Each structure stands twice: as C-alpha cells, then as structure tokens.
Image (cartoon, rainbow, N blue to C red):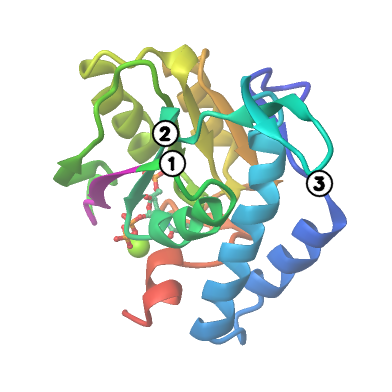
Amino acid sequence: MTAAFPSLQLVDHPLIQHKLSLMRDKTTPTIQFRQLLKEIALLMGYELTRDLPLTTERIETPLVAMDAPRIHGKKVAIVSILRAGLTMAEGLHELMPSARTGHIGLYRDHDTKMPVEYLVKLPEPEGRLFIIVDPMLATGNSAIHAVDVLNKRGVDDARIRFLALVIAPEGMTKFADAHPGVRVFGAALDQCLNENAYIVPGLGDAGDRLFGTK
Ligand SMILES: O=P(O)(O)OC[C@H]1O[C@H](OP(=O)(O)OP(=O)(O)O)[C@H](O)[C@@H]1O
Ligand SMILES: O=c1cc[nH]c(=O)[nH]1
Ligand SMILES: [Mg+2]
C-alpha cells in the first residue's frame, strides 16, 4: 500500500529494482529485455500470491499421513493484455502451472490514446481469482478497459488483481477512481506521462521492445 494510493502495492525487492533498471536502459537488447520481464513477473508473483487461500489434501510422506496445504491452482486465471502482458504471464505460469489462461487484445489508438479491443478469450469465471498482467499502466485506459471486460462477465473487483511493472501517477489515479477494489501490484511509480502519453522515465514501448517491432 502507498500513501497516495491505498490499492497500490509497490514491490521494492532489490532484485526486482535491479532488473527493472536493466530493462529501462535503452541499450538492453530484446532477448535480455524479455528474459528480465519474465523474471520480474515471477518475483512479483511471490507478493501477489502471498494471501492465496490454501486447502488441504491428505497425503502420505515416507513417514506418516498428513493433511498437507495446497493451492487450488485451477481456481486462478492469468489474463494477459496483449501484447506486452504475454511475457509477464509466462513468468507467473512458472509459479502456478495449473492456472487457467485468458487473453484480452488491446492496442492504444495513436490519436485518442483509448484502447481498441481486438480479442477476448477468457476461462469460465465461476469462483476464480483473475490476475490481469500488463507491464505498463500509463493513462490507465487499457487497464480500466480490461477490468470492465471482466466485470461484464460477472467477475467483481474483489476477485481481480492487476500486475504491472511501471505505473504513471496519472493512470493510477484514474484506475483507482474507476476500480478502487482492484489491488494493483507494481515495481515503480514513475514521474509522469509525456505529451504522447508515454511514461517518464519509463522504459519506452514495452510491446515493441519485447517483440522487436517498431
Ligand atoms: O495505460 P495506457 O495508456 O492504456 O497504456 C498502456 C498500454 O499500452 C501498451 O500497449 P500498446 O497499446 O502499445 O499495445 P502493444 O502491447 O500491442 O504494443 C501497454 O502494454 C498497455 O497495454
Ligand atoms: O510508456 C509507455 C506507455 C504506454 N505503453 C508503453 O509500452 N509504454
Ligand atoms: Mg505498444
């Protein structure tokens, strides 16, 4: 939780901060950029999942029978906002291999900066926790749209978490106003947006740097 944003948790572990600095460096090549984002998502996943409910399952150790704690993996859905969320989802899936997968395809319109939706594929919402992943929360419009998509399918804000990497204060303000009940996890709250709605200092265009496009 931060003072300005009760729903935001910044994960300031030194490994995450170090890897984020490498990602911000404009000389970091695509292959390393992608690997770093995957690693950071995995590390942030540790905090994001800290309070997941446990059930128990009867097992036998080599010595005795016991009721062993287990996470119900199939009750979690990891939803990537395309394209940049895909790589974060890879990291989280290493932590929770049996989590279900969803995709919400969005791109920002060049002029309006509003998200344009081109794909929605989601698992059954019943009883599931949804983790939406996207490294960049800039104006907040894409994040708000993605949560709206889930809300329309009956998933309320309390069952949604948003995993980002770099967050602009302007976007976080807008997102927290629209969805105060969605917990947001990020690695950095940056300074501001520039005139093209890019995060400053930021790391540039995440999708282009991940996939080598322009
Ligand atoms: O907070 P916002 O102002 O909505 O901006 C954030 C969005 O912009 C980027 O995607 P982009 O539109 O570049 O699509 P891409 O991942 O396909 O490149 C990013 O991955 C977010 O989805
Ligand atoms: O800084 C930004 C803003 C939106 N999308 C990005 O990839 N980077
Ligand atoms: Mg992009």
Label of residue 99 in the image = 1
Disc 1 residue crowd, few under 14, some 14–19, many 20+, Cα 10 Å: many
Does 162 sit left or right of 120 as displayed? right
- Report the front residue among 105 and 49: 49
- Report the front residue among 32 and 99: 99
Q: Please give the range of residues in magenta.
A: 101-110
Q: Is residue 190 visible?
A: no
Residue 19: x and y, percent? 73, 67
* Residue at mark 3: 12
Tags 1 and 2 touching, CB below 8 Å: yes
* Residue at mark 2: 74
Q: Secondary structure at mark 2?
A: helix
- Report the front residue among 45 and 201: 45
Amino acid under disc 3: Asp
Is residue 106 shown in magenta?
yes
Quarter of the image with the C terminus is bottom left
Does 117 sit left or right of 61 as displayed? left
Quarter of the image with the N terminus is top right
Is residue 35 shown in magenta?
no
Residue 131: x and y, percent? 46, 35
* Disc 1 to disc 3, C-alpha distance: 25 Å
